[in-house]
Image (cartoon, rainbow, N blue to C red):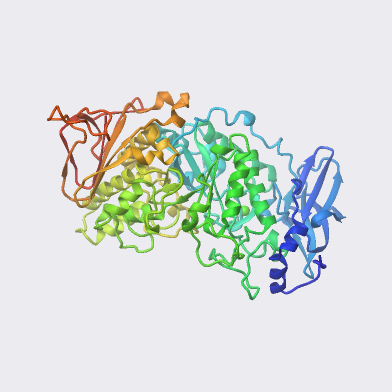
Amino acid sequence: MENVTQKRTPGEWRELFSSQEFEEAYEYGGDDLGAVYQTQGTDFALWAPTAERAELLLYRAGSAEEGAAEPFDRTEAVRTEKGVFRVHKNGDLSGVYYTWLVTANGQTQETADPYAKAAGVNGQRSMVIDLKKAEPEGWDKDQEKLPKAPAPVVWEVHVGDFSHDPQSGVSEENRGKYKAFSEKDTCLDGNTGNPTCMSWLKWLGVTHVQILPMYDYGSVDETGKKIQYNWGYDPMNYFVPEGSYATDPYHGEVRVRECREMIQALHRAGIRVIMDVVYNHTFSIDSVFQKTVPYYFYRQEADGSFSDGSACGNDTASERRMYRRYMIDCICYWVKEYHVDGFRFDLMGLHDTETMNEIRAALDCLPGGKEILMYGEPWTAGKTAIQPGYEQALKCNAALLSDRIGFFNDDIRDSIKGSVFEVKETGFVNGAKGLETQIRSSVLGFCDGMGGYQPSSAHQSVSYVSAHDNYTLWDKLVHTLTDSMEPDFGAYNEAALAQNRLAAGIYFTCLGITFLQAGEEAARTKYGDDNSYRSAAKVNQLDWTRMHEYRDLAEFYRGLILLRKSFPAWRQRSLEVLDQISFVDAPEGCVAFTIRTGAEPEAAAESVLTDNVAPWQELFIIYNANKEAVEFRLPGGKCSDPEQEPSENYFALEGKWQLLTDGTRFKIKEDTKLEQIKELEGSVWAEPVSITILGR
Ligand code: CA
């Protein structure tokens, strides 16, 4: 291969890195990149094939401001096979900070280590860490008590939003921090009957918490000198937890321990943790990637400029072998070292399908790895310069993905309550007509916008109506109501509550992974802010007083969550579940169907679930978006003609059904079981703008 260390133009780099020859010559398969710590010495390794030279600098602190402007040690690295630069240093280096001085493309720049496992304040310097020493107590037994194979109900929250509110019940020093999750018996106004934070989560009963970016990101100054807020979709150090959520961002081991403590606290509550990961772009081009191997990690247009399908100024190149490997290494690391149970991929549509499938395969090889969830946004923010021959992980390419890689179903989201982009556009629950077909597709977890594309597993579609982006569900509903009603707060509130309950009822009874933005269950508002990524913490935070003002709505969600978790059909991954669903004739503005438990071998084998299985073999579910009540004949009523054969759709030809909800409430017994409200025979009235659920 030609000399790869000479200076080139951006276009020439693009050409070099797009060649098979380069990939084959420099793909490195070792697992020792970064700083491999042992008490007697540390091995440093940096993949930088286009670098002329690299030097390792050691520092006493993580930043110049801490009195360590100059390195106390400098060592010229040795270039070894596949362009990996190596240095070995004797002695116990735990807690020592380091950087690389890399000369590449005619420039010498100091950079943090792309494989750094810990970092100083603001992530500018990497830190050697003894990961064992940064384990919280009981970490080795952390995952022992997690319930098996739940039907996922995911609650999406930002670390800060969870507890920033002074009414969060969390002590002042831990508000907005990882440590807020470790606080027990949190409540509003000192009243344990009003749970907040972790107590709320346990009460609500969600199975998974999805954390908005918790890797080290760049948009918040970790020194705390300025009051800043950001969601954190701007990655810097992918293997390192964000420092602004730690009680001490200066000592690299603190954020590692506290992030683990957060995950441990959730696990102790029986809740799994999903990490929001953003591998599709970096905070800026001034990144560890660009400083170590200029242009390799990014997609470029033909003229050499950076591709921008992320709308954040750059797109990484998942199809390049060493970036693909980087993603796989990083994800497996968060599983092994932080016990993460699932991953949500930001703008997954920018990644190639091969990379996504390889990540799935790598996770599957880990202990318990098949249970690890993977799903993402099957879209992009613009066109990307992916190398020819690769397919993007877009919704239209879902068939190319493993059936255990899910995707956010924006068709469900928008058909239920209207487009996220058109403020005033309504959906099925808030006034739009003619959406019955889309809603029926939603029940089956299909994407209607793709000509009824059928996912390859019943858990591939992520059913939801609100996430951190766009309006909260409540704000969207209020926006669409204000045009159609007299300005009367009480009336809005009642109408929005009914629409909210119906919206939740719909996506909670669709096939797929159930997903909600934290606080949606209690009418979360961002005061009409539809893009709050860097708005004040006060706009973003969960308002725990309001959460209790809307406690009845949250009670309704709690009933839906209980039903979702206990009715086995929704645990089924196999598409055989489609045969257990039968739509019933319904008038305009209504969708009605029955769903049966089926044989369901996968869940039945899990004895741990038997305590928690609903006693009903079949549910009858009616969505009524009309402003009038509608009468439905109950399916499988007693045969008036004794000669008539029972319909093969129903194995129990019993005419009695138990009403589980009339759309306003559930009856929950001893905090864990659903009970019937009353028994019905013959017919049922579906109330205006409501979901009716019956079981038998
Ligand atoms: Ca940071």
Count of number-bearing discs: 0
Q: Residue at x 46, y 24 (%)?
A: 607
Query: Is residue 180 left or right of 117 when viewed as pictured?
Result: left
- Residue 388's place in the image compared with 327, above or below, is below
Could you tell me residue 412's position as x and y percent?
Answer: 37, 52
Q: Residue at x 60, y 40 (%)?
A: 364
Could you tell me residue 556's position as x and y percent?
Answer: 31, 38
Q: Is residue 276 visible?
A: yes
Q: Is residue 71 visible?
A: no
Query: Is residue 226 left or right of 608 when viewed as pictured?
Result: right
Quarter of the image for the N terminus: give it: bottom right
Q: Nearer the viewer, residue 232 or 18?
A: 18
- Residue 558's place in the image compared with 628, above or below, is above
Could you tell me residue 82's position as x and y percent?
Answer: 80, 56
Could you tell me residue 17's position as x and y percent?
Answer: 71, 65
Q: Nearer the viewer, residue 575 or 384?
A: 575
Q: Residue at x 55, y 60 (%)?
A: 391
Q: Nearer the viewer, residue 373 or 676?
A: 373
Query: Is residue 111 left or right of 469 when viewed as pictured?
Result: right
